[in-house]
Amino acid sequence: MNASKICPRFEKAMSILSQRWTGLIIYQLSQGPQRFCTLESSISISGRVLSERLKDLEKQGVVHRQVFPEKPVRIEYSLTKKGEALKPVLYEIEQWSQNWIEETGGE
């Protein structure tokens, strides 16, 4: 049997998306720009982990961080063009989950 090698780009994409919480963060941001505290409460993620994931997604060019010079300072996160391109992928995963994942009581 001749096993084909996995494409390095696909492997990199999967390593980004498979990090815990990353998919949920991108999914939440696909609804529109959000503030840190909104993301934190909607996903039920610790602030430290959310901060790490957002920084990593910024570095990867998936998320944009915008600082508004107000008092107090307002910071919003949104998807970049690269992040927006993931919307159809997330939609397909959502559809797959509706068809194939059994709903559980309380996690």
Image (spheres, rainbow, N blue to C red):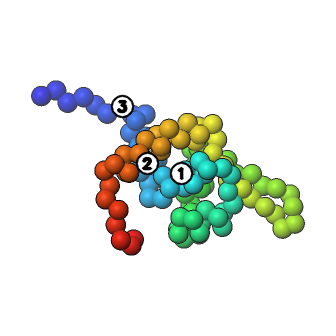
Identified at 66% across, 50% down, the residue is 32
Res 17 visible: yes
Q: Which mark is residue 27?
A: 1
Mark 3: which secondary structure? loop
Mark 2 neighbour density, 10 Å: few (under 14) some (14–19) many (20 or more): some
x and y, in percent, of residue 95 in the image: 41, 45
Identified at 78% across, 61% down, the residue is 74
Res 58 visible: no
Q: Amino acid at mark 3?
A: Cys
Mark 2 vs mark 3, CA separation in Å:
25 Å
Circles 1, 2 touching at the beta carbon (< 8 Å): yes
Identified at 37% across, 46% down, the residue is 96
Q: Which mark is residue 7?
A: 3
Q: Please tell me whether residue 66 is drawn above or below residue 42 in the rendered image.
A: above
Q: Amino acid at mark 2?
A: Glu
Disc with the residue nearer the chain's start (1 vs 2): 1
Mark 2 — residue?
94
User: Based on the displayed image, in which of its 4 quarters is residue 3 positioned?
Assistant: top left
Mark 2: which secondary structure? helix
Left of 27 or right of it: where is 5? left
Disc with the residue nearer the chain's start (2 vs 3): 3
Mark 1 vs mark 2, CA separation in Å:
10 Å
Q: Please tell me whether residue 72 is drawn above or below residue 34 in the rendered image.
A: below
